[in-house]
């Protein structure tokens, strides 16, 4: 890797590249590889930064998410709780990173059957992320809430879930509206 040659294998900035790669692997549904790279990132960051550093927290978070995808739920919970604890100690309570960490932990808790704690975390995360523009994070929270209410066999209103919940695909700010062609020409919606 060119960055390793330029910076050396222990440089903290190298961890950003490694972190982005681990996140990419997770987004490609390759949790084993994502966990491997997340462990490397966490180890590197812990050697060069204090354990309370937010970069260490984000490394714990991505490791926890990858482990959850591998069904290593107890270890995943450990890392997600550690990540959230750091964020709560050093960020304002309404910071989006705390809400995101809560959503990851809440979704994991749904899988382990701890629905009351999961619901508290997910609803709080949803309210904190509202209006932030963090489309991906808000979609993840909604996915956790859908799983939660399916596990309870009811939507928020208390009625039984009749079928699969559907959320509109988020429109990214750079996407043209559905009725505008690639060159800006209009077509029938």
Image (spheres, grey):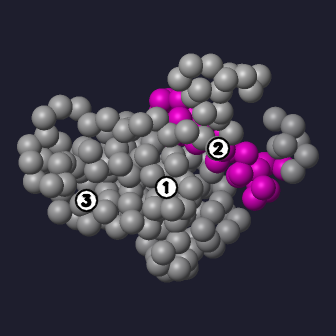
Q: The residue tagged with tag 2: helix, strand or loop?
A: loop
Crowd band around label 1 with a 10 angstrom C-alpha radius: few (<14), some (14–19), many (20+): many
Of 24 and 172, nearer the camera is: 172
State the residue at coordinates (72%, 22%): 185
Distance between the alpha carbons at the discs numbered 3 and 2: 30 Å
Residue 11 x %, y %: 79, 56
Q: Which residue is mark 1?
A: 61
Per the rendered image, the range of residues in magenta is 8-36
Position of residue 109 in the picture relative to residue 13 (left or right) = left
| Label 3: which secondary element | helix
Q: Residue at x 75, y 59 (%)?
A: 12
Q: Measure the alpha-carbon separation of dots 2 and 1.
A: 26 Å
* Mark 3 and mark 1: Cα distance apart in space: 17 Å
In the image, is residue 90 above or below residue 146? Answer: below
Of the residues under marks 3 and 2, which one precedes in the sequence?
3
Residue 161 at x, y = what percent? 13, 40
Image mark for residue 118: 3
Q: Position of residue 33 (x, y in %)?
A: 53, 33
Picture mark count: 3
Residue 173's disc is: 2
Q: Quadrant of residue 125?
A: bottom left
Residue displayed at 17% across by 42% down: 150
Residue 2 appears anywhere in the view: yes
Counting residues from the start of the chain, the first of labels 2 and 1 encountered is 1
Residue situated in front as seen by the camera: 71 or 171: 171
* Viewer-nearest of discs 3 and 1: 3
């Amino acid at each position: 890797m060119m960055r390793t040659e330029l910076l050396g294998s222990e440089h903290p900035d190298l961890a950003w590249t490694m972190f982005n790669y681990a996140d990419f692997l997770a987004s490609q549904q390759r949790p084993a590889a994502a966990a491997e790279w997340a462990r490397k990132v966490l180890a590197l960051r812990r050697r060069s930064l204090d354990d309370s550093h937010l970069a260490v927290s984000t490394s714990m978070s991505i490791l926890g998410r990858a482990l959850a995808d591998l069904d290593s739920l107890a270890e995943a919970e450990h890392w997600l709780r550690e990540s959230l604890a750091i964020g709560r100690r050093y960020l304002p309570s309404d910071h989006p990173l705390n809400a995101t960490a809560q959503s990851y932990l809440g979704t994991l808790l749904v899988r382990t059957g701890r629905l009351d704690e999961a619901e508290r975390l997910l609803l709080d995360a949803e309210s904190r992320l509202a209006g932030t523009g963090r489309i991906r994070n808000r979609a993840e929270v909604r996915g956790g809430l859908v799983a939660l209410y399916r596990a309870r066999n009811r939507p928020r209103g208390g009625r039984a879930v009749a079928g699969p919940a559907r959320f509109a695909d988020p429109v990214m700010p750079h996407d043209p509206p559905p009725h505008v062609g690639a060159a800006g020409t209009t077509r029938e919606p």
